[in-house]
Image (cartoon, rainbow, N blue to C red):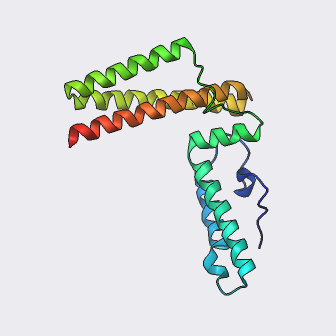
Amino acid sequence: MSIDLQQDFFRLFGLPRRFRIDEAALELAYHDLQGRVHPDRFAHLPDSDKRLSMQWATQVNEGFRTLRKPLSRATYLLELMGVDAGLHTNTAMSPTFLMEQMEWREAVEEARAAGEADELAQLHTRLRQHSREVFDDLARQCDDEQDYAGAAETVRRLMFMEKLQHEIDDALEALES
């Protein structure tokens, strides 16, 4: 049993290289691979085989973590396609999106300051719905249109939205305690 440590995560799990994946197939492949490469299965073998099994298990775990979450899967897919999403270097966003973000943040801050947990919960629900719509756009850009530059911008937008979602969660948690 061996795993090619050079293959991409999609191939590792027998999945097509695309944003939309069969999550149940990913889960099934993960458990199958994990069962085959788990270090405990190689405990009785020489150290070199033990090290190799650790590399395999690490590759399987890292691949699963990457593909399981849509945002990390998209970023990884863009890397495979030779597109730098510019997550840490490209913060240029459209004025419309930046205004939208300011409005969301103001609404969150107002609800937090007023102690309005119901309003925060509604913002949470609305943002989650909006995120689903943007993820649908991302899937279309990656899988249907192969618009990887557009997908990179969408990934950056989703990162802003994910951060905002965490801020809402934190505000709700603070009000509950």
Q: Quadrant of residue 46?
A: bottom right
Q: Quadrant of residue 115?
A: top left
Point out residue 25 in the picture as x, y percentages from the top left corner: 63, 55
77 left or right, relative to 138: right
Pick out the residue farthest to the front: 89
For image coordinates 67% across by 81% down, the residue present is 42
Depicted 75 relative to depicted 101: above or below: below
Pick out the residue farthest to the bottom: 44
Q: Work out whether residue 25 or residue 138 is closer to the camera in this orientation and state it.
A: 138
Depicted 118 relative to depicted 8: above or below: above
Q: Quadrant of the C terminus?
A: top left
Point out residue 157 in the picture as x, y percentages from the top left corner: 55, 26
171 left or right, relative to 53: left
For image coordinates 63% across by 33% down, the residue present is 139
The reply to whether residue 100 is visible in this rendering is yes
Q: Work out whether residue 158 or residue 135 is closer to the camera in this orientation and state it.
A: 158
98 left or right, relative to 64: left
For image coordinates 26% across by 25% down, the residue present is 111
Point out residue 88 in the picture as x, y percentages from the top left corner: 60, 33
The reply to whether residue 128 is visible in this rendering is no
Point out residue 145 in the picture as x, y percentages from the top left corner: 73, 27
Q: Quadrant of the N terminus?
A: bottom right
Q: Work out whether residue 63 or residue 17 is closer to the camera in this orientation and state it.
A: 63
Depicted 57 relative to depicted 85: above or below: below
**How many numbered callouts?**
0
For image coordinates 57% across by 39% down, the residue present is 71
